[in-house]
Every structure is written in structure tokens, then in C-alpha cells.
Amino acid sequence: MVRFPLSLRLCVLSLFASTSALAQAPSPQPAPVVKRMAVPEAHQGAASDGTFAYAIDNDRIGKYRLSDGAKVDQWQGERRLFPHMNSCTVVDSKLYCAASNYPAVPQTSAIEIFSTSPLKHDGTVSLGFGPGSLTVIDRHDGKWWAVFANYAGKGGEPGRDYRYTMLARMDDHFRIEQTWAFPKDVLARMAPMSCSGLSWGPDGLIYATGHDRPEVYAMRLPEAGSQLELVGTLGIATPGQAIDWDPKAPRRLWSIARDRSEMVASDMPEVLASRP
């Protein structure tokens, strides 16, 4: 039997202990909730164009008017074709949604595109096999941004766990240009699952959520290297899942409470983003 030096064993134990302590730390106080909408499709995420909100489920979408909460349109797909839609965003009257075959493996992904008026499926961009399951698609600064999630257990592939989750910048043809790893402190909070939601904020920071903690992680691209930098952790009244900033209400973030089938709008505090 191989015997590792005592110093190395102590270092590994210390790392495990610090990771465990970080994972068990309490979440910050939640940001104020300004609107709740009870909707049956609120199972995977929410998106907003400032006038309407879209509740996302694996194979269905509901469109709701923000002024009165009325349902104005809906779409239902075949589950065999849409096994797992996740995060969506509205760009130029189109709803772009990240989709995958989760929890099946090998992992495959696609971007599903919908017109918003009327709400109907317009097309698919197949990404096929990739570096994880696509959970996020967002548009920022003339580029597409995607998250490829990896998991420890259900939906994961051998040799890759949650630590291999990555943010990718893509061109207009959805080809990957650059990728970044998530900070280890953020990954420890997401484990054993992964990043379920991410949206570029109005302040130029990247805001991400995990699968089940009531937290939003504010991050930025690094000046050098390949790992995102954690700026701060904010509390939110909903447990993870996909998010989207409201383009017409500053600092308003849409999320879901899947246990109550609600879309929730929270007014998030500012985050100090100065570099040391």
C-alpha cells in the first residue's frame, strides 16, 4: 500500500474540511420581492422582455403580461423532442432557450428558438456532443454566452463532475471562442449539481445561480487566466434555477420558486465590483 507523506495527507484533509465548511455556510438575507406570479410552467426558469414574463418548463412555455399577470399565450412541445429546457433569454423578439438531454448520457445539447408573438417554436441549433449539458444561453456585448454544466452523479459523465462546469463565449454561429472555469467557492455551493442560471447584469457583472440554494453569485471575467472572479454573493427568495434580468426595471431579477410554481421578481442590491 502506498503511504503518502503526513504533510500531504494533512493538506488534503484541510482542503476537504474547508470545502465542507464553505458548503454549509448560511445564505445571505434575501433581496426584497416586488412581484409574485403563480404559474404552472415555473419549473425550470423565467425570462422577461420588460412587458411580458415567460415561465419555462422542460417542454412548455407560458407567456404572462406583467401589468396584470394575465396569461396571453402558451406553447407545448413533445417531451421526446424537448426533454429538458432550462434557461431562456429574449433577443430581438425571439426567445432563445438552452436545452439538453439531461439526465441522459452521453450529454447532448441544443438551442431552441421561439418567436414571442405568437409564441411558437421557430427552430433548433443542434450543438450535439459537448463539454457538458447546456443550461444557459444569454446575449451580451455582441456575443452569445453559454454555460455547460457537469454533475457529480445523476446526469454526469465519468471523469467530469461539477468542477468541470464552464462559461463559454460564442460567436453569432454559436461556435465557442473562449471558456472560463467557475470559482471554486461558487462550485462548492453548487455541488453536487451545477450552474442552472446565468444572466449578464446591467452593471457588467455576471450573475449566476445553482440548482437549489437561495443565492446569486456575482462574478466578472478575469484580467488574466481562465477562472471567473467572485465579486459577491447575494441572497434571493427563490432556490436556484434559471434567472433573467428585467430590461426595463433596473436591478430587477426574475427567478422561480418551483415548489410553489411561482415566477418571482426581486430587486437586487448593488454589488461593489472594484478590483483590489
Image: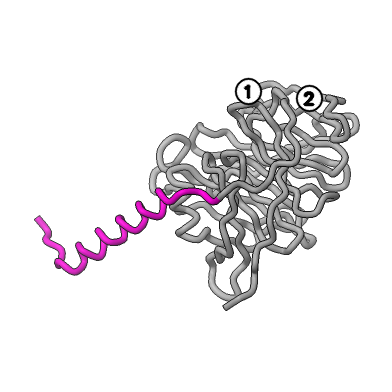
Residue shown at the point (47%, 36%) measured from the top left: 155
Picture disc at residue 80: 1
Q: Is residue 200 above or below residue 122?
A: below
Q: Is residue 188 visible?
A: yes
Name the magenta segment's main secondary structure. helix
Seen from the viewer's position, the closer of residues 4 and 259 is 259
- The residue located at (71%, 56%) in the rendering is 200
> For residue 82, what is the image quadrant?
top right
Dot 2 amino acid type: Trp
Q: Residue at x 55, y 45 (%)?
A: 210
The amino acid at mark 1 is Arg
Q: Position of residue 219 (x, y in %)?
A: 60, 61
Q: Tell me if 120 is positioned left or right of 178 in this view.
A: right
Q: What range is drawn magenta here?
A: 1-28
Residue 76 at what x, y percent from top left?
75, 22
The answer to whether residue 220 is magenta is no
* Mark 1 secondary-structure assignment: loop
Q: In x, y percent, where is residue 237?
A: 61, 41
Q: Separation of disc 2 and disc 1 at Cα? A: 15 Å
The foreground one among 171 and 265 is: 265
Look at the image and tell me in which quarter the N terminus lies: bottom left
Q: Which circle marks residue 75 in the picture?
A: 2
- For the C terminus, the quadrant is bottom right
The quarter of the displayed image where residue 67 is located = top right
Count of labels in the image? 2
